[in-house]
Amino acid sequence: MRYLTFSVDGRKTFGAVTGGGVADLGKRTGFASLKDLLAGDAPEIHDQPDYSLGEITYLPPIDDPVHIWCLALNYPEHHDEVQAAGRVQELPKQPALFARARDSLTGHEQPLRHPGVSEQYDFEGELAVVIGKPGFRIPAAEAFAHVAGYTVMNEGSVRDWQFHTRQITPGKNFLRSGAIGPWITTADEVSDVDSLRITTTVNGEVMQDDRAGSMVHKIPRFIEYVSSIAPLYPGDILATGTPSGVGFSRKPPVFLREGDMCEVAIEGVGVLRNRVGRD
């Protein structure tokens, strides 16, 4: 099943993709939000949609997570390209963790916001995990039981701000600099996470192309690590890191400009599409 949050006719709601459109589960069920639905029993979905996909405005699938945890340097070839740029040394022995704020992300087909104060605005296609079952200090062997599903993230980074100091958080949290969506594909529809192919294109040119199996710290270790810090809640988002091919490591660098179209595709999960705008 594919679940999403959206607005239609000035009203925010959530639903499921079915019959070529969207069933409005905010209207059909007693759940208050998609977070509540993920934590409860999934309702039976009939094929008859309430809206076509063209009628809705996509919002981040979970627009109010308690946590958005992200991994840096979680693909060996990406580490190598960052190391070649003189930014890091060894591969992290532990997950290299940082957090994003929820207003740093926008939805599918919504404009990414160019930072304005920098011209080093970069793309990062990533697989993101969405938590369904809460837990604290979750053992790696039990981690997948806490996964509701998967979505796509463009973890947009403002590189000069990221490298102002050893703390990368500023460059990762510019308003609407990243995107997530278009929906959550439930875990039962993804038989082999490691086989998922992640590709990022900018204006139709392939920039990143790898599989999730290349991760250094796999999803069970990620869940174990972050749930040792604080409990995980339904709707929490865990972005698993980006493959090689990011813009700042290229010669010459390729940064996002106003009007560029960026797409991140993860086979079996979805395609996240955003054009770069500027306020």
Image (cartoon, grey):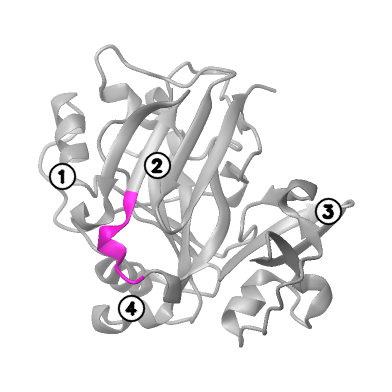
Left or right of residue 212, residue 5 in this image: right
Quadrant occupied by the C terminus: top right
Q: Contact, CB < 8 Å: mark 3 with mark 2?
A: no
Q: Contact, CB < 8 Å: mark 4 with mark 2?
A: no
Question: 116 or 218: which is nearer to us?
Answer: 218
Name the spot of residue 42 as percent of width and height, x first. Answer: 62, 83
Q: Identify the mark nearer the N-term, 3 or 2.
A: 3
Name the spot of residue 99 as percent of width and height, x first. Answer: 44, 52
Q: Which element carries disc 1, helix, strand or loop?
A: helix
Give the labeled residue for mark 3: 8
What amino acid type is highlighted by mark number 1?
A: Pro
Q: Looking at the picture, does residue 74 appear above or below residue 81?
A: below
What amino acid type is highlighted by mark number 3?
A: Val
Does the image show residue 51?
yes
What crowding class fits label 3: few (fewer than 14 Cα within 10 Å), some (14-19), or many (20 or more)?
Answer: some
Q: Which element carries disc 3, helix, strand or loop?
A: strand
Give the labeled residue for mark 4: 143
Q: On residue 76, which mark appears?
A: 1
Residue at image position (42%, 59%) is 268
What amino acid type is highlighted by mark number 2?
A: Gly
Quadrant occupied by the N terminus: bottom right
Name the spot of residue 229 as percent of width and height, x first. Answer: 36, 70
Residue at image position (54%, 74%) is 234
| Residue that lies at the very extreme toward the bottom in this rendered image | 41
Give the labeled residue for mark 2: 125
Find out whether residue 193 is within the magenta segment. yes
Residue at image position (81%, 65%) is 50
From which residue to which does the magenta span run? Answer: 191-197
